[in-house]
Image: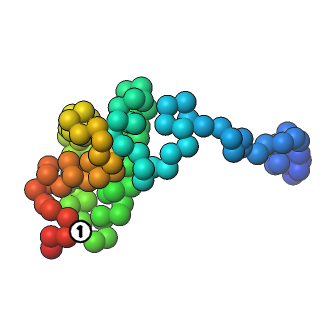
Amino acid sequence: MGLLSPAFLWGVPGDVLADDSARHPVIGDKPARELLNADLLALPKTERQAWIHGAAAQMVQVLAPRDPALARCASDFFVTFQTGQEETAKVMVVYPDKQATVTLMAVTATACEVMPGQD
């Protein structure tokens, strides 16, 4: 078998840069730290679920080295028992003007019966 062609490795010639002017049709170009619950509630359900799942996965990764028990609880809440999605969405409806990431953390802290900063 011969070597692969450089054209194959680099793909089809042409401009492959992302369009920096592309904006999300619902939330625009708002950074995640500024997203409110209302912004996520305006998304289609599957897109909102994907956002919550991604944010929860990142939260678990950040928590794991510092507090493995809390990380395990959060993982169980969102993945094993699959109740985190529904509970987070319910709270988002009640508090549409709150930050989505803060809501996710608060719902998780409540489900795992801890408060931030508690050791």
Q: Percent position (x, y) of residue 119? A: 15, 73
Write down the residue under mark 1: 67
Residue extending farthest to the front is: 97
- Could you tell whether 73 is left or right of 62 in the image? left
How many residues crowd around disc 1 within 10 Å: few (fewer than 14), some, or many (20 or more)?
Answer: few
Which amino acid type is shown beneath numbered disc 1?
Asp
Query: With respect to residue 42, does 52 lie above or below?
Result: below
Above or below for 78 versus 69: above
Which residue is located at x 26 percent, y 44 percent?
Answer: 78
Asked whether residue 116 is in view, the answer is yes
- Which residue is situated farthest in the top direction here? 44
Q: Position of residue 61 (x, y in %)?
A: 36, 60
Residue 9 image offset from top left, x and y in percent: 81, 48
Tell me if 105 is positioned left or right of 6 in this view.
Answer: left
Give the number of marks: 1
Q: Would residue 82 be visible to someone looking at this image?
A: no
Residue at the left extreme, as displayed: 113
Color style of the picture: rainbow
Viewer-nearest residue: 27 or 54:
27
Q: Is residue 85 left or right of residue 58?
A: left
The secondary element bearing badge 1 is classed as loop
Residue at image point 55% right, 43% down: 29
70 lies above or below 88: below
94 and 106: which is toward the camera: 94
* Residue that appears at 88% across and 50% down: 6
Pick whichever, 98 or 106, lies toward us. 98
